[in-house]
């Protein structure tokens, strides 16, 4: 494709993303799924061109809040064309003449700029991306609704955390202890030209500085490694699922933590991956088979289901990886900060509490309930724990420092406080929260 053709394809993709993900009344599908469908239906776009088109569109999505502010400032609506124009001028720092030239009206290129768009280009050219006149939320590239909670969480560190949420995330892998160990997995990857470093906190983790095509490696195909952020690995670590235990992964999704806990159990005992989505559990089954997990079963949670009632008080460990706003993953999923709003948070707080109460009934006396989110918001984390513990259901906090010392002797605890609280700037992981509670014997 010509440079103009790539620009035209990126504009088309941005238009689809706006319609399906971000516009008022849109289905608000994850942008990566929408982009995948878009590119799959346009097979004439080759591999190298797909990368360029995706990078152009994702650059706009990552800076959408600031770009929208600049366009509003000059009295222009944020169309896909103008957003990409602003991206090229403000973020890529392209020269105005070069940008105008690529809108060449050629057969496969974008239509030439009209008079209003030319005026917009003239107004934007040479401006800094971050303008002193920006409101704080826009300057930090954060949605306004989340700013107060994030400011309360991070205080003077907010700017550093906001910058980390903009940066490209590394790629973390977990060595599958059922088939290998970390050193062996690292050696195998190096043999395929992929250099990885051990993660600082997880005993199973390997980190690549940027995304690489891991799924084509023999190590991945043979189930020796899994893609999993180090923070997610630490939640599985703190669950402390041991051989012979009965474990429930109550919101298993694609079963990333189920896989990790099955490995710490050495395939002995029984682990049940539960979810309300049949497609997610189907995908989990494929991952479990590739990883060599044979002590796991899957259960679809459905209205009227009596599974939980029959198994009340029988599990040694119950992990609740609760549905949440996903604010801790914004560096990987920049579209999520545009798709999520205060109404979503309000709904999720109710859902999280209800799930906690139901999952707690599964825990046997002396067993543990592990609550986790990939959120940075106190309402979904510490405040949710305070609300649950106030019920007086015979659960008490297992302090992080003692639990960590037993599981990772000699390794400094990642954070202070009774619960695990991780962030991109603080620990180099995605934003995660994890609380371990024990039921009175």
Image (tube, rainbow, N blue to C red):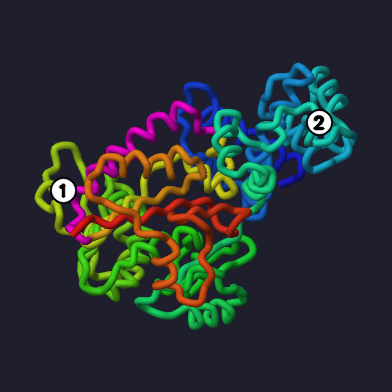
Q: Nearer the viewer, residue 270 or 97?
A: 270
Q: Is residue 282 visible?
A: no
Q: Which residue, given by chain and number where applicable, does mark 1 sit on?
A: 308
Image spot of residue 411 (x, y percent): 52, 73
196 inside magenta stretch: no
Residue 231's tag is: none
Image spot of residue 225 (x, y percent): 45, 71
Q: Is residue 194 left or right of residue 419?
A: right
21 lies above or below 312: above
Q: Nearer the viewer, residue 426 or 310?
A: 426
Q: Residues within 10 Å of mark 2 (few under 14, many from 20)?
A: few
Q: Nearer the viewer, residue 205 or 80?
A: 205
Residue under the image location 32 percent in, 36 percent down: 351
Count every numbered label the image shows and give the total: 2
Image spot of residue 334 (x, y percent): 58, 42
Instruction: Determine whether the residue tagged by mark 2 lies in a helix, strand or loop.
Output: loop
Can you name the residue that lies furthest to the left here?
310
Q: Which residues are magenta?
A: 338-366
Residue under the image location 42 percent in, 48 percent down: 373
Instruction: Determine whether the residue tagged by mark 1 lies in a helix, strand or loop.
Output: helix
Image spot of residue 427 (x, y percent): 58, 59
Residue under the image location 69 percent in, 20 percent down: 77
349 inside magenta stretch: yes
Q: Nearer the viewer, residue 97 or 120?
A: 120
Q: Quadrant of the C terminus?
A: bottom left
374 lies above or below 103: below
Q: Is the residue under label 1 in contact with that under label 2 (CB below 8 Å)?
A: no
Q: CA distance from mark 2 to mark 1?
A: 55 Å
- Displayed quadrant of residue 82: top right
Q: Which residue, given by chain and number where applicable, does mark 2 sit on?
A: 132
Q: Main secondary structure of the magenta part?
A: helix
Q: Residues within 10 Å of mark 1 (few under 14, many from 20)?
A: some
């Amino acid at each position: 494709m010509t440079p103009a053709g790539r620009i035209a394809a990126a504009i088309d993709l941005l238009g689809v993303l706006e319609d399906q993900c971000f516009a008022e009344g849109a289905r608000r599908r994850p942008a990566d799924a929408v982009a995948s469908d878009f590119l799959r239906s346009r097979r004439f776009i080759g591999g190298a061109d797909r990368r360029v088109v995706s990078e152009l569109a994702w650059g706009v999505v990552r800076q959408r809040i600031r770009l929208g502010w600049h366009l509003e400032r000059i009295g222009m609506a944020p169309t896909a064309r103008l957003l990409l124009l602003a991206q090229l001028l403000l973020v890529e720092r392209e020269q105005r003449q070069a940008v105008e030239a690529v809108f060449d009206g050629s057969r496969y290129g974008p239509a030439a700029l009209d008079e209003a768009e030319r005026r917009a280009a003239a107004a934007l050219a040479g401006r800094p991306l971050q303008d002193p006149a920006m409101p704080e939320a826009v300057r930090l590239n954060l949605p306004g609704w989340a700013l107060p909670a994030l400011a309360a969480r991070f205080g003077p560190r907010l700017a550093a955390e906001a910058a980390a949420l903009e940066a490209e995330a590394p790629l973390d892998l977990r060595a599958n202890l059922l088939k290998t160990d970390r050193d062996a997995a690292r050696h195998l990857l190096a043999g395929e030209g992929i250099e990885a470093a051990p993660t600082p906190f997880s005993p199973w983790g390997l980190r690549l500085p940027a995304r690489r095509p891991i799924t084509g490696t023999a190590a991945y195909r043979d189930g020796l490694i899994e893609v999993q952020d180090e923070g997610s690995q630490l939640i599985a670590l703190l669950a402390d699922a041991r051989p012979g235990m009965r474990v429930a992964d109550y919101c298993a999704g694609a079963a990333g933590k189920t896989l990790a806990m099955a490995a710490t159990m050495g395939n002995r005992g029984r682990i049940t991956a539960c979810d309300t989505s049949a497609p997610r559990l189907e995908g989990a089954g494929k991952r479990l088979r590739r990883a060599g997990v044979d002590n796991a079963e899957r259960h679809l949670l459905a209205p009227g289901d009596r599974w939980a009632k029959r198994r009340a008080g029988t599990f040694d460990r119950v992990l609740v990886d609760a549905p949440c706003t996903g604010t801790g993953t914004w560096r990987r999923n920049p579209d999520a900060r545009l798709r999520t709003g205060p109404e979503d948070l309000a709904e999720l707080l109710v859902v999280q509490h209800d799930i906690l109460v139901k999952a707690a009934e599964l825990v046997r006396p002396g067993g543990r309930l592990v609550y986790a989110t990939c959120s940075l918001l106190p309402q979904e984390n510490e405040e949710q724990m305070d609300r649950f513990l106030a019920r007086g259901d015979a659960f008490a906090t297992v302090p992080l420092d003692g639990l960590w010392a037993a599981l990772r002797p000699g390794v400094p605890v990642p954070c202070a406080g009774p619960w695990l609280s991780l962030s991109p700037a603080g620990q180099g992981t995605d934003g995660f929260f994890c609380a371990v509670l024990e039921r009175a014997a």
